[in-house]
Amino acid sequence: MRYALCAFVAFVTSSALAAPSAGSSSELIEKIQKKYEETRSLEADFTQKTRSKAASMGTLARGRLFFLKPRAIRWDYEQPRQQFVINEDEAWLYVPEEKTIYLYDAAQIINSPVVLSFFSGLGQLGEMFSITQLPSESGPPPRYRLLLLPREAESPVSQITLWVDPRSYQVVGIQTEDPLGNINEITFSNIQLNPPLDPSWFALKVPEGVRVERQEAVPTQ
């Protein structure tokens, strides 16, 4: 679940197009932001791969993402089975195998500059990141690429790479790398834009027999 908080910005579709011809970086960012502003809610399957520079093997996780504006996101992990949710007031990680819900202060997460920008879409990222358009991938499927380098020396990420669908201008993948060289990559499929999502899906419900433990530190896995 490493860096899952950043990944919900990836509004996804897939397509089999000819190799894209990109305009300027600012034009591409504007189109991505416009798509984000048109998106009220989203469902998507996700695959998450993490690679640790210190370890020889990485990890693989899968599940379903639910996003509802303005500030509600839910990650239902199938492999391993767990759930991570953020709403306006709370954030928590539910681990059924441990019969435990780990409760976090949502303000700590939402008020992070990186997370705040993702909740607002890509339009504000230029204030914190230098954004460069990389050569497009020819595919299949073809995709634009954007490289984001933090302007602040003490950023929790050293770089972010976004893959963008050239027809829909939705972000179809995101990869983050931290200062230690650890990499997290998330891709999405089976996307539904603006599905009807009930806000109650993002409310904390404690199953019988499950304990709640309040945590001081922000989750990093």
Image: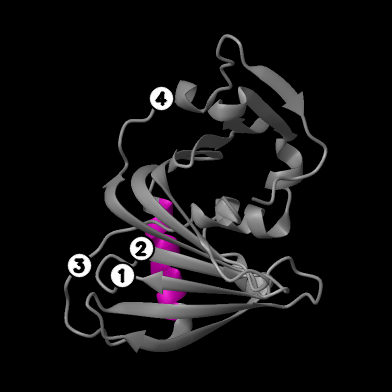
SS state under label 4: loop
Pointers 1 and 4 in contact (C-beta within 8 Å): no
Q: Residues within 10 Å of mark 4 (few under 14, many from 20)?
A: few
Q: Where, by quadrant of the figure, is residue 150 drawn?
A: bottom right
Measuring from the top left, give residue 52's x and y in whole percent: 62, 68
Pointers 3 and 1 in contact (C-beta within 8 Å): yes
Q: Name the disc covering residue 165, or none.
A: 1
Give amino acid for label 1. Asp
Viewer-side residue, 91 vs 32: 91
The mark nearer the N terminus, 1 or 4, is: 1
Q: Label 3 vs label 1: CA separation?
A: 8 Å
Give amino acid for label 3. Ser
State left or right for residue 51 relative to residue 36: right
The mark nearer the N terminus, 3 or 2, is: 3
Compared with 27, 12 (above or below) is above
Identify the magenta region: 27-37
Q: Name the disc covering residue 15, or none.
A: 3
Give the residue displayed 45% in from the left and 87% down from the top: 134
Asked if residue 20 lies in the magenta stretch, the reply is: no
Pointers 2 and 1 in contact (C-beta within 8 Å): yes
Measuring from the top left, give residue 67's x and y in whole percent: 45, 41
Pointers 4 and 2 in contact (C-beta within 8 Å): no
Give amino acid for label 2. Gln
The total number of labels drawn is: 4
Asked if residue 35 lies in the magenta stretch, the reply is: yes
Compared with 71, 179 (above or below) is below
SS state under label 1: loop
Q: Label 2 vs label 1: CA separation?
A: 6 Å
Q: Which residue is mark 4?
A: 198
Viewer-side residue, 101 vs 31: 101
Q: Which residue is mark 2?
A: 170
Give amino acid for label 4. Asp
